[in-house]
Amino acid sequence: MLGWALVFFIVAIVAAIFGFGGIASAAVGIAQIIFFVAIVLFVAALIMNAVRGRRAL
């Protein structure tokens, strides 16, 4: 497992050396968008659950 971590670390270093920083920054931007969409959906689900309340079966 530690070997795989080392391999991915070396791949990341090589990618940084060859200038693939644009890909990394694009991935960060996409991750931020997905995070905020997930937060909005979570809050919407909480509100909908509070509005509907509990129903008797």
Image (cartoon, rainbow, N blue to C red):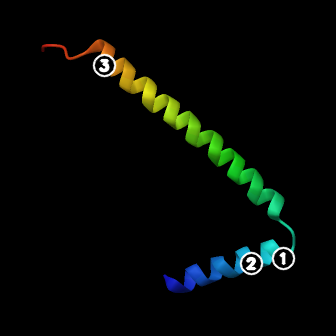
- Assess whether mark 1 and mark 3 are in contact (beta carbons under 8 angstroms): no
Crowdedness of circle 1 by 10 Å Cα count: few (<14), some, many (20+)?
few
The quadrant in which the C terminus is found is: top left
Q: Which amino acid does label 1 sit on?
A: Ile
Labelled pair 2, 1 in contact (Cβ < 8 Å): yes
* Vertical arrangement, residue 45 with respect to residue 54, above or below: below
Give amino acid for label 2: Ile
Whole-percent x and y of residue 52?
29, 13
Using the rendered view, name the quadrant where residue 51 is placed. Answer: top left
Q: Residue at x 37, y 18 (%)?
A: 48
Q: What element carries label 1?
A: helix
Q: Distance between the residues labelled 3 and 1?
A: 51 Å
Residue, disc 1: 17
* Mark 3 or 1: the one toward you: 3
Q: Which dot marks residue 13?
A: 2
Classify mark 3: helix, strand or loop. Answer: helix
